[in-house]
Image (tube, grey):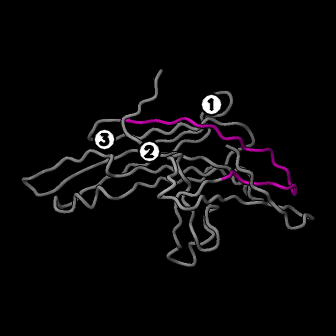
């Protein structure tokens, strides 16, 4: 549409992690608080229903769709549990691998029973494959951290640091009172023949 819908808030972050074997790895993280959804209550059966749909697509510089993904999330249960259902979060995570170039990433979320929709558009640049050259991932502001429940999970995603899973901030503001620290995360890929790199982080206001 000419104007993006903004029926409810959600966060969407697209990144690039140029791993040696997957230089075009471009993870997408979409997060929706379940208290933003509309729930239908059925007193006759003492149950409720809620539903959300996430659709994402990557478009190249010519407007062609190179990757598309979606998922439907359905929530149901007893009315007594509805309050707890509203305290959750939907996490949509995908790891498409793209060719070098600049891409537009479109994400649309629908609250089925609303019915309401929201959409976000962002861009990501996938650098050319540089073989053994020095490479660095996107800079990620850390939203929260979670320790892996099983050792085999650690390292399965580029957002793992050891056995800790990193959830990127979705652009929501940080608070001086609630956020005592500002965490950042990135990965450096030195390439063959490079010494261990040193990094400097500069904050500009």
Residue 76: x percent and y percent?
24, 56
Q: Secondary structure at mark 2?
A: loop
Residues marked 1 and 3 touching at CB (< 8 Å):
no
Which span of residues is magenta-colored? 117-139
Name the residue carrying label 1.
64
Query: Number of callouts in the render?
Result: 3
Between label 3 and label 2, give the one nearer the viewer.
2
Q: Is residue 77 left or right of residue 22?
A: left
Q: Is residue 159 left or right of residue 72?
A: right
Q: Which residue is at the far left? A: 44
Name the residue carrying label 2.
10
Q: Is residue 158 left or right of residue 75?
A: right
Q: Is residue 162 above or below residue 25?
A: below
Residue 45: x percent and y percent?
10, 56
How crowded pointer 2 is (Cα within 10 Å; few <14, some 14-19, many 20+) is rated as many
Name the residue carrying label 3.
112
Residues marked 3 and 2 touching at CB (< 8 Å):
no
> Which residue is pictured at 67% across the width and 43% down the height?
205
């Amino acid at each position: 549409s000419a104007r993006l819908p903004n029926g409810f808030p959600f966060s969407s972050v697209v990144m690039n992690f140029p791993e040696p074997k997957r230089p075009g790895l471009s993870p997408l993280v979409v997060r929706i608080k379940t208290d933003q959804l509309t729930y239908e209550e059925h007193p006759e059966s003492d149950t409720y229903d809620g539903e959300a749909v996430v659709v994402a697509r990557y478009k190249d510089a010519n407007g062609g769709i190179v990757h598309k993904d979606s998922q439907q999330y359905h929530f149901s249960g007893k009315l007594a549990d509805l309050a707890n259902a509203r305290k959750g979060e939907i996490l949509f995570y995908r790891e498409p691998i793209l060719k070098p170039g600049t891409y537009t990433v479109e994400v649309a979320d629908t609250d089925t029973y609303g019915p309401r929709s929201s959409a976000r558009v962002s861009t990501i640049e996938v650098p050319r494959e540089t073989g053994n050259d020095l490479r660095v991932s996107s800079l990620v502001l850390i939203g929260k951290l979670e320790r892996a429940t099983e050792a085999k999970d650690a390292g399965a995603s580029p957002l793992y640091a050891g056995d800790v899973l990193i959830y990127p901030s979705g652009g929501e503001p940080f608070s001086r009172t609630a956020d005592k620290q500002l965490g950042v995360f990135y990965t450096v890929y030195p390439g063959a023949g490079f010494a261990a790199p040193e990094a400097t982080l500069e904050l500009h206001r």
